[in-house]
Image (cartoon, rainbow, N blue to C red):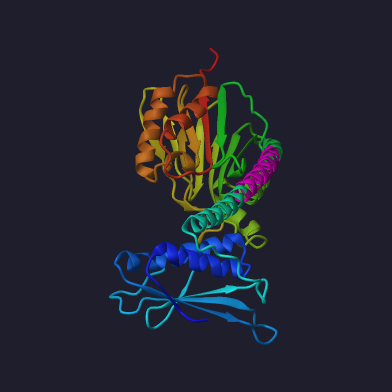
Amino acid sequence: MTPRVLHTLPALQQAVRGLAESSALPVETRARLVLAVSESAGAALDAGQAVTLEVTRETGRGRAAAPALVLTLRTPGAARPPRAGHSPLPARTGSDGSLTWRVPLTDPGGGPAPHRPHDAADTATTETAALEEELRAALGRVDALVAEKRRLTEELEETNTGVLALYVQLEERDERLRKAHGQTLRELEDALRPPPLTLDGLELAVHYAPAGTDAPTGGDLYDWFLLPDGTVHITIVDALGHGVRSTRSALNVTHAVRTLALEGHPLESIVARTHEILTPFDPDLMATVLLVRLHPTTGDLQLANGSHPPALVVRRDGTAEFLEVRGRGVGFPLPGSERLLRTRLHEEDLLVLYTDGLTESRRDPLEGEQRLIESVLRHRHRPIREIPGALAEDMHAVILHSDDTLALTLRRAPQPG
């Protein structure tokens, strides 16, 4: 087809639209092609430059080739070639600055060229009708897209509603499982802890809190029982780790200590002997141990220690001291208590036994020990059952390091007569 030289934008649009109609292009494709060519040639035409439109039809060869209408736009002698920009229909830019559109044909043969009136009024009417047709096609496309968007939005809302309902159900089930799991562990732990010990002249109370609510049991455990001579034996254990495994380790230690104590082994030898019994069966076991024996009537107090924080005693007159005994715990190198500390607990003296979760919540053991003394002095006159919890509340006002916490308080009551 002979190239056409065009000087005005309406003439260019009329030519492109006529080619599209004669090639039976869909209305939407025709509109895109007319708009793309118009945008590309607009600057040159506004500057008074003529543009050239070349048209060819590719018949297509081979099975993979498809017939196409090919339009090439040139601006001979123009200072700048036309630019496609963000064209409604992408074009290929040639080395000479030309733009080429290749539009596949659904009707390879094309139909007869439509009658193009020569009268200006008729031409305007025809162009207006063509524009209206393209506008209707565009609006139809917009309406279809809006309807599709609405449908997808409704489907998405239904899906989200279903997912949200499923998520809520899963959360509720998970919460029920967590509560059941926690309740089971608490019941198990309560079953493992010794029953309350009631003795004339002696008051006992304990507070325990796990490191996290998801694992309501841990490696902090205590045991108390009466020896045949009437002496009260107390064991405080802090096994390495958290959860059920550390509870098992702590339980093994308390059972071994109880057996050895009831067999009559000297208190200062029990930590080392416990290590000898348990570590062959559990090489990874590590636990700190504090052993206390108190005669309720005389107040005679004995302590053995294996790497555990020292006991704190607050006397009736308000003086306080830590009962330091050096030693190494079960699973440590050279385990055992280096000596046996002997002292006396007088009437209304308060003894505090605890694990490091109480004093190391701010990562500074020395600072924690000082705060513990101040807290015990503040609460020592309260009923014994309230003191351990009050101490834990004071010590955990700020928590930088979360750990299982055990606090056990023991006070000699005034003797009758």
Q: Position of residue 90 (x, y in %)?
A: 49, 69
Vertical placement of residue 173 versus 56, above or below: above
Quadrant for residue 43, please give it: bottom left
Secondary structure mostly seen in magenta is: helix
Vertical placement of residue 63 versus 291, above or below: below
Could you tell whether 83 is left or right of 358 in the image? Answer: left
In the image, residue 163 lies in the stretch drawn in magenta = yes
Looking at the image, which is closer to me, 347 or 121?
A: 121
Q: Is residue 295 visible?
A: no
Q: Position of residue 56 (x, y in %)?
A: 54, 80
In the image, residue 308 lies in the stretch drawn in magenta = no
Q: Position of residue 14 (x, y in %)?
A: 49, 64
Q: Please state the extent of the stretch shown in magenta in the rendering.
A: 144-172
At x 62% / y 24%, what residue is drawn? 199
Residue at the outermost front position: 119
At x 60% / y 33%, what residue is drawn? 231
